[in-house]
Amino acid sequence: MGINKDQVEGRAKEAAGKVQETAGKAVGSIEQQAKGLGKQVSGTAQAAYGDAKEKVKEHARDANKRP
């Protein structure tokens, strides 16, 4: 299975969102916590999209190998 841009960027957004949420909790900023959660959700969706693209590519490759 390969890795595509959406998987990498999505997981990076998830991580950045977690950091932002944690920093928001540390300083007591509900706004930063919410922004962090938003980034996490966006990142999760993008990573899932990337995962789905890879699955489609795998199935297409497998279908082309069949006699």
Image (tube, rainbow, N blue to C red):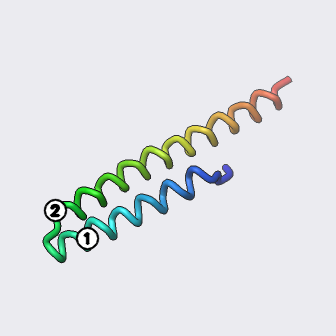
Residue placed most toward the observer, 17 or 53: 17
Residue closer to the observer: 56 or 46: 46
Element type at mark 1: helix
- Image position of 62 (left or right of 35): right
Depicted 53 relative to depicted 1: above or below: above
Image position, residue 63 (x, y; %) = 76, 27
User: Considering only vertical position in the picture, is 8 above or below 53?
Assistant: below
Residue under the image location 82 percent in, 31 percent down: 65
Q: Residue furthest top?
A: 67
Residue at image mark 2: 30
Q: Residue shown at 81%/29% (left/top)?
A: 64
Is label 2 in a helix, a strand or a loop?
helix
Q: x%, y% of residue 26? A: 18, 76
Residue 56 relative to residue 18: left or right:
right
Could you tell me how far apart the alpha carbons at marks 2 and 1 are, in whole angstroms?
A: 11 Å
Which is more toward the observer, 9 or 27?
27
Q: Is residue 29 left or right of residue 2?
A: left
Q: Residue furthest bottom?
A: 27
Look at the image and tell me in which quarter the C terminus lies. top right
- Amino acid type, callout 2: Ile
Q: Is residue 7 above or below residue 18?
A: above
Q: Residue furthest left?
A: 28
Q: Position of residue 58 (x, y in %)?
A: 69, 38
Camera-near label (2 vs 1) is 2
Q: Earlier in the sequence, mark 2 or mark 1?
A: 1
* Residue at the image point whose x is 48% and y is 62% from the top: 12
Image coordinates for residue 56, horizontal then vertical, percent: 65, 34
Q: Which residue is mark 1?
A: 22
Which residue type carries mark 1? Answer: Thr
Mark 1, Cα crowd under 10 Å, few <14 / some 14-19 / many 20+, is some
Residue displayed at 22% across by 69% down: 24
Rendered position, 27 above or below 5: below
